[in-house]
Amino acid sequence: MSKIFFTPGPSQLYPTVKTHVRRALDEDIASISHRSKDFETIYRDAVAGLRELLAIPSDFEIFFAGSATEWMERIIENCVRRHSFHFVNGAFSKRFFEIAQELKKESVRFEVPAGQGFAVADVTIPDSAELICFTQNETSTGMMIPMEDIYSIKKRYPDALVVMDIVSSVPCPEIDFSRIDAAFFSVQKGFGLPAGMGVLILNQKCLKKAEQLQGEGMNVGSYHNFLSILRYHQKHQTPETPNVLGIYLLGRVCADMLKTGIQNIRRQTEEKARLIYDYVALHPELSLFVSDPRVRSQTVIAVNAVRPDILKQKLTDGGYIVGSGYGELRKSQIRIANFPAHGVDEVKKMLELMKI
Ligand SMILES: *Cc1c(COP(=O)(O)O)cnc(C)c1O
């Protein structure tokens, strides 16, 4: 029986991925040199596809690395002399904060309990903060931060760089890149691709900061410091031998998503989220973890369940794999991903199986 993964990452592959992998093997993508013209074409294709799909302005660069977690580390190294500020409300935002601490920065966090939103207007950020970090969609709890809240912080603190982790929401939210400085994600969630690649979208201010820090003799990392990546990026290459297959597949899936139309993808995401939320609200054994609808994620839905293990098993037996609650929450929750790879009919069938 074929399975459908509603897990919040890795997740269901985008439906066209199998065909693209076969073609990539036929075309020897995994054997070509990363210094060849053929590779440069693949690289440009992925960058151009992402730029069009996410409406990324021309003064932002798009870099590739190994994972989203890698980007957390690189961003701290390249954009923070001493002070970063972190909005924390779950495991991934906490990880970003801890990486800054591990890199010996003087980092400050503003933390709210899991599943709650931030009243950003009430948060005061020290003027010393050079970088403000948001996890726009906190995958561990199904809570999201409305873009307007993030833009409002950038407006109040224009001198700080503002970065968002968009790993489990991209490509669904519409982002006005002119109102932030950087965003990053990995590809195994919303893009429905095999894991092993992270993407960073950053403006010239971030690059300038890296240059400044390097000029001051600070350690901004080695091969993957922003300036080293930029030098190769300008030749449509990477410093190291990259995940060529991953870059190829990203370009192909961006083209597929552009064909479907990003507005259609966004509309379908909202429609599927509504189906799931409405269903959970009426189910006798289920309830929504995030009580404030304003901060409820459209793409990762955290559900309190009376008997999460039995529910998960029943779904698995029917071919539908959903996620556990994160960490301690596995005893009381399931999490359901709602990514572009998930069709409306599959969502309906999955919900049908949840009936008791
Ligand atoms: C999954 C996830 C990450 C980590 O991604 P990796 O590809 O494992 O580095 C970071 N942030 C969020 C919000 C995530 O959901």
Image (tube, helix red, strand yellow):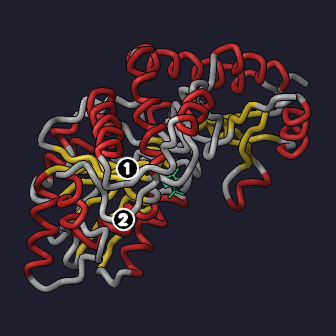
Give the residue pinned by disc 2. Answer: 240
In which quarter of the view is residue 104 placed? Answer: bottom left
Q: Quadrant of residue 162?
A: bottom left
Relative to 199, is 83 on the left or the right?
left
Residue in front for this viewpoint, 180 or 63:
63
Quarter of the image that includes the N terminus:
top right
Q: Inspect the image, locate mark 2, and give the three-letter code of the amino acid beneath it.
A: Glu
**Assess mark 1: CB under 8 A from ligand 1?**
no
Q: Relative to residue 346, is residue 47 drawn left or right?
A: left
Q: Position of residue 201 (x, y in %)?
A: 27, 47
The residue wearing badge 1 is 199
The answer to whether marks 2 and 1 mark residues whose Cβ atoms lie closer than 8 Å is no
| Quarter occupied by residue 174 | top left
Q: Residue at x 48, y 66 (%)?
A: 95
Residue that appears at 21% across and 45% down: 180
The disc label shown at residue 207, or none: none
Residue 197 in the image: state x and y as whole percent: 47, 52
Q: Residues within 10 Å of mark 1 (few under 14, many from 20)?
A: many
